[in-house]
Image (tube, coloured by chain):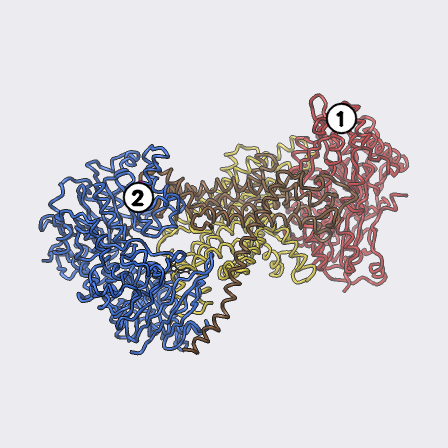
Amino acid sequence: SASESKNGASFPSGASEANESTAPASGGELTYALATSPDTLDPHRSGLAVSVRVFRTIFDSLVAQLPDHTIKPWLATSWTVSPDGKSYTFKLRQDVKFQDGTPFNAEAVKFSFDRILDPATGAKNATALLKPYQSSEVIDDYTIKLNLETPSVAFLGNLSQAMLGIVSPTAARKYGDQFGQHPVGTGPYKFVKWDENSDIRVERNPDYKWAPELVDNKGAPYLDAIDFKIIPEEATRIGSVQSGQVGAIETVPPQNVLSLKNDAKLQLFQVNTGGLPYTLFFNLSHEPWNDAKARQAVQYAVDIDAIVKSLYLGTYERAWSPLAPTTFGYDPSLENGVKPDLDKANRLLDELGWVKGADGVREKDAKKLVLRYVDGSPNREKRNDIAAMIQQQLKKAGIDVQVEITKDVSTVVYTNQAYDLYGNSQVNSDPVALNSFYHSIAPGARPTLSHLADPEIDKLLEQGVVETDDVKRKEIYGKVQRYIIDNAVILPIYVFPYTVAATRDLSGLKFDSLGYPLFNDVSLAK
Amino acid sequence: MAKVIAVRLLSCLAVVAGSSVLVFCILYVLPGDVVMNMIDPSSMSPEAIANLRHELGVDRPFYEQFLHYFREVLRGDFGKSLVNSEPVLPKIFAHLPATLELAISASFVSLTVGLALGVLSAVHRNKPIDIAVRIVALFGISMPTFWSGILLILIFSVFLGWFPAMGSNGWNTLVLPALTLGMLGAGFIVRMVRNSMLEVLGEPFITTLRAKGLAERAVLYRHALRNALIPGVTMMGILAGEMLAGTVVIETVFSRQGIGRIIADAIMAKDLPVVQGVVLFTAIVYVIVNALVDISYAYIDPRIRRLHNDRRSGWA
Amino acid sequence: MSQLLEIDRVSIRFATGRGDLQVVSDVSFSIAAGETVCLAGESGSGKTVVSKAVMRLIDDENGKISSGSIKLNGTDIAALPRQELRSIRGKKAAMIFQEPMTAFDPVFTIGRQITETIRRHDRRITPNEAHQRAVEMLRRVGISEPEQRLKQYPGELSGGMLQRAMIAMALSCRPELLIADEPTTALDVTIQAQILQLLQELKNEFNMSILLITHDLGVAAKIADRIVVMYAGQVIEQASTAELFARPHHPYTQGLLQSITTMDSDRSQRLFAIPGSIPGHADLPDGCRFHPRCPYVSEKCRSEAPPLKDWGGRQAACWHTDRLIARGERPPAFEAAAAASSTPEPADASAGLPDDVLIELRRVTKHYPFGRSVFSRKKGAVQAVEDVSLAIRRGETFGLVGESGSGKSTLGRVLLHLERPTSGSVLFEGRELGALSPAKLREERKHMQMIFQDPYGSVDPRWKIGDIVGEPLSVHGRAGAREKKEAVLELLSLVGLSPAAYDRYPHEFSGGQRQRIAIARAVALRPKFLLADEAVSALDVSVQAQIVNLLSDLQRRLNLTILFIGHGLNVVRYVSDRIGVMYLGKLVEIAPGERLFRRPAHHYTRALIASIPTPVPERQQDLGVIHGEIPSPAHPPSGCRFRTRCPAATARCALEPPELREIGPGHFVACHDPAG
Amino acid sequence: MREAASVKTAWRTKRTPTTLQRTVPKIVVARWMSLTAGAVVLFLIACALVPQWIAPYSPTDMQADRILLPPGSAYWLGTDYFGRDVFSLIVYGARESLFIGFASVLVGGVSGALLGALSGYLGGWVDSVLMRIVDVIMTIPGVLLALAVAAGLGPGLWNIVLAVAIASLPNYARIMRGQILSVKSRPFITASRSIGASELSVFVKHVLPNSLSPLLVMACIGVGTSILTGSGLSFLGLGVLKEIPDWGALLSQGRGYLTVAWWICTFPGMAITLFVLSVNVIGDELRDALDPRKRRE
Ligand SMILES: Nc1ncnc2c1ncn2[C@@H]1O[C@H](COP(=O)(O)OP(=O)(O)OP(=O)(O)O)[C@@H](O)[C@H]1O
Ligand SMILES: Nc1ncnc2c1ncn2[C@@H]1O[C@H](COP(=O)(O)OP(=O)(O)OP(=O)(O)O)[C@@H](O)[C@H]1O
Ligand SMILES: [Mg+2]
Ligand SMILES: [Mg+2]
């Protein structure tokens, strides 16, 4: 299918393939430059993709998900699902040890999942991923039963995520809220040290022999150690890989992708991430954007192609749907659906009674047509630039876009709800991710970004969670996606490709279905 | 003498305490709070958030928080980061050395380059070389450090491959950041040294030295420069502050560890204990530098040893 | 006699922002081995430039010798490459300067600076030997505890001591020629006498030549063998000292000699002054450069510059030398000028004045505490003025003399209540100033004005003359702009400045003119009292005379009471009705002017008077009658403060401070054992 | 004698041309620099006032089909990644940049100078207290100040101005204080006081005007550094998104394109440098003009 063809890394030809035939060299250290600093290495507490890239090396999950969305064993050797879909029984590997020597067993799994639910932990994304988990029963040392509140088709896929990785109960108890600075898991690398803002070092876990099907090397990794350097400044990051000071860098800015591609000393990896693409959410509870016509006017007035072309120079794909193309259920028929049409936009606004004033801004009842556009700082993935462009584009339709760039997104967006348009994305393995953005909420609970409250969509989303038939499930999500686009609930902008530039002596870098790098197979040519 | 030192210490303490109080007030009036930065608001109930606030003590009245903080500090407890519960003191000790290393070596660059060019400029007053030096100095002053830093990386790391582009381990990772920050300071020092050199070169004792038959080199560097240094040293006191502030950008550009980034992040996250702790330490560093400036004054200028001349007079 | 230094038709130019400037033209003179030659002339005549040119020090000031030659021992210094110059500087010829305080590098010890010189010229000398030599030299110039002094910094020594150290440094490499640029101008008369005596001794001992630059002909008379007079960059006369004083061949020299206030100057006569001032280099007159100020001026003088002509072993550059020689006496024009303005007055100072007290000091003490801190109370204090009582009568001029640091200026400031006394009180017309409110005090200031020593520092450089002179009017009066301008113009003409000065800035004026500006400002409000703190000390003799004349004119016209502080004893004697002598914060003697000089009672006063260099070569007295230097006012000696330097000190002096008592009509002295 | 003369003439012929070389270009260069500096500043002020008369394009016109064009005849200084004309951006950005530069120096300089002047003139405990306060301000990192101000006043132009002003205040205060200390001991101050002028008028009419020179020099540098501090803030992500960015923001936003499209950030950088250079040259000239002793005919 279309989604399949877009999946996976665009691996460089030549050198790396030649390397695969010969046995990879053992030893060596890889320096891998990150663009931002992880918040914590506690998988349960973290909310950042960059943290996942690091702690994926330290923690393993119960299961693994392949790019084709199939689930494979990892720390669990096999599992059964109860007919009502509300309990999962896992058989665990018996030869696994945590890096601190603690044996891996059903207790450890129970501890990990219960830890996520414990409010004292302050888990962020992990809580959402683990839903609808309720409790677990240790059947025996290596058998565990997980009980769910409601059935969930996405549950297994979510279990494959690093944020639901299994932590060492001994270490977690010992370090308490400091566990993020002293992470211990069962992964191929063990944590050595973390110098804040500077680097995180992990070294080979020599006992490792339980790698999932995602990688070729099932044993201990070839590398002696990985140094994750934190280099926020783009130019410095690129400079350090060009000068050979580091072995690989992540998040190559679009404008540099071309020149690095042509650099004989370097190779470039690019893999699209799954989940929700970068999406601008309208706040449907605010006048006048609660009116679909007004939103559609914006939809027509914005030229997303121009944005993506200018800013990402052809290195990022444009998004068309609330889901990223590699995500299950993605509806390719939405592609090329909405075309920019300024006249149409103007007509829609005219119909709504917004008339252009002297300053070119539309007015109605002595009120200006204002769109409050909030974005975070710093200018990650040129998102602020998107705001600048949309501001100019909407100006032509007579909409006054007031952009607020803030460090304190939580207060502005989540506490004060002071936005008409706000952009976000989420790396995820399953379309259930849509629930936390488009499903209406219980009274008193915190609203979703879109504030969408449509019983029909709610019903579809609820069905999507339990529908086990892939075809039907796809259909359900197709309906959801079309509804969201047709009603201009959002403006999908781009699909984020995770890009890595590495020196040519590196080989074996792989990525999981979400686009996170895997270092099990990585080796450095001597 | 003991009394002089005691007074000095007291006023230093007053400054340090003053800056702590000021920071506390500033952070207190900042809108938003640490809790919202710590958690994912969408996943926590308002009650839970209120609980968390209470736990952290950020819901108590201003004066209570204030007194509490200082009582703890006096006991040697600087508290924990509100963001990741890391104890503040070890965190500062882990990052301060890198920043000091940078600030000191940058000051060194500023001083050597600034002095050399400043003297050159004064000696060749109004000649093309002087004009050139002055323009170069203004360039140093008018180039933002993030920009000159990136340029240096391109030139010395990417094209020439002489120095690493980033990091904070080993002297060679220090070269480019120290140069970048140092060039800024050098620009200021050149101007200052040129002025004071011109002044000193007009003093009668310079004629005496020449009349004694001293080589021009000795006249310029042994005698004139040492006299011209006196306002330069004051400048170093001022620069120390600028250097500490300048490290924020430099540390980001060169991905160095350091107190600069810590405080920038902490401020943005309103992580009060960390900000407080760092400010306390930078204030101490600043106060120490200025005390050193005073001492080196007395070393450079014996007149100060007698008269307790004011150290801040006579700049520019 | 073989010539050590031969300066032959030397011209010197400076490159300045406005182009080249010729500062010295065609100067020729020579110095024989062992000879002392004095270079004299008004400020700005080029004396320093010539002396610096001898060592090519002008190179570093954008100057160059544009023609002529300077031969030292036969080597032409003008043509030497810079490298070789250095072996001459300090080694063959050495220099000492006017301000010893600023002539040393303040940040190195004296020892370091002396040994540096020694080792510069003889690399074989070890640091230790150099040190030994420095110790010897210091001892030789009369510095006690030389080992100790070598470790000290210039700021820690007194001016007299530093000048000795300077001499020691200059002589440390045994130069053949010593150039001394006004070496004593900045020093007290007592110290000046000591230094001059030292120079003379050393000259004989080291068998060197001295080129002494001075504008004080009294000093020249004392030690010079020959005198070279410069005017506006040219030599206009040279002769042996005796001949020059006896029979000047140039009207300028004659004028200079006459301007000197001496012990014999008649108080009833106006002082003689050469009219006008030295021209700037930009607007040199044609012909003889002196002609605009010359009483002999003729058509020829205006068009043709006179050459330096031989007159039997001496030289002069004037078209009218023969007339001068013929007449011998004062030139008629000068005489006329002096006569016209002299309005004789009864010289009887003490008796003639009404006994009407204008200002009274009652037991005034002023201490400057130091070392005070939060924890300790006063550590100590500079006792600048100690228990001084004094009454100044309406209309009189009271002179105050004493060595530097004796507290004269402090007394003046306290008197005007610019500073509050530590204890005691000041009464002005019977009102106690200390009891007045600030506003009242400001009002009272109308009647009390001040002129300062430094004519360059005492006017705001950013103000126009009109505004400076008019400032008191704006502060006190409510006069309109037109009236004010008129008043200012009148004041300007009162002090002898042209109305054109109104819109100009201070830097465009000479020192003398600036002092006139300061005076105009001081008298703008028609004050009753004027404090002149060393008002003429910084000026050339000829200008000094002009200003003194101006002051006495104004006193008469405006019925001023003046407190005249000075260290030029002759001038103080000339202007003052009564004189007070201060020593270390104490008023040690008060007497009517003439009486003080004729019958000084305090040993200190006698010493002061004895130190005055007299510009008459024949009347040389014994130099250096008083030894040592003024002690620190922070730790004054017990009992009589002068006892440490007094030739007549007894045991009693150490125990009992002497009180001021009357020993003659209006003559008070504080001494247990007053002289004659 | 003759020999000496020939040596002498040789020396002279060698020297004369150096004097000429020394003086002629010096004057020319000095004049040339002031004139150029004046022209540059005038031009920039014109840009700030009437950018629409100078800029060939609209600074907000983003066109995807003309992105990253190198400098050429149509776009003199090239186009940026939005497809905006860099030259027009610089012209329009002048207003904000000049404002930041001048306003922050004005605010910081005036208040700092006032503080320093008070401290130096009054002396005693006032001095001790004020100087300790200045010390306290100096110890607080500029970033923190910037944030605090931004928080207090909301984001905007003034936030940068105020942050820079507060951060630079201590320097002005210190210089002013030192200067006042030296000026107030000069005789003409005593002279004015002895006339009976009130303290205030002595201070305002004599002490202040004579203390301003070094402040002027510092302020001229300050104009440039405040633009830079502004750019530093936008580098740290504290800036504000503006439709027409100031030079500092342009420079900071374009830095990522240095190797790909050098013109985007190089030209705004050059604008800053040129501006700083010119202001300093003019400042020196102004200082001389204010001082009657240095005034040229
Ligand atoms: N470096 C210089 N550049 C330009 N002009 C100079 C320089 N040095 C001295 N002059 C000028 O040369 C003239 C003579 O100066 P000089 O210092 O020799 O006078 P002087 O006779 O020593 O006076 P004084 O008694 O005041 O010391 C003065 O008018 C002075 O302005
Ligand atoms: N403001 C002050 N603070 C401390 N000490 C002072 C101050 N003013 C004067 N003194 C000290 O008081 C003493 C007397 O000084 P004063 O200036 O009155 O002497 P003077 O007789 O006028 O000397 P001179 O002839 O050098 O002008 C000196 O030792 C001086 O150092
Ligand atoms: Mg002189
Ligand atoms: Mg005095």
Secondary structure mostly seen in the magenta stretch: helix
Question: What subunit carries mark 2?
Answer: C
Which residue has dot 1 on it? A290
Chain C's colour?
blue
Residue type pointed to by label 1:
Asn
Q: Which chain is red?
A: A
Question: What subunit carries mark 1?
Answer: A
Magenta residues span C490-494
Under circle 2, the secondary element is helix
Chain B's colour?
yellow
Residue type pointed to by label 2:
Ser
Image quarter for ligand 1 equals bottom left
Which residue has dot 2 on it? C493
- In the rendered view of the protein, which quadrant contains the N terminus of chain C? bottom left
- Check residue C320 for magenta coloring: no
Q: Nearer the viewer, residue D237 or C50?
A: C50
Whole-percent x and y of residue C558? 23, 41
Chain D's colour?
brown
Under circle 1, the secondary element is loop
Residue at point 65%, 39% (across, down): D51
Q: Is residue C554 left or right of residue A422?
A: left
Whole-percent x and y of residue A368? 70, 26
- Give the number of marks: 2
Residue density around tag 1, few if under 14, some if 14–19, many if 20 or more, within 10 Å: some
Q: Is mark 1 within 8 Å of ligand 2?
A: no
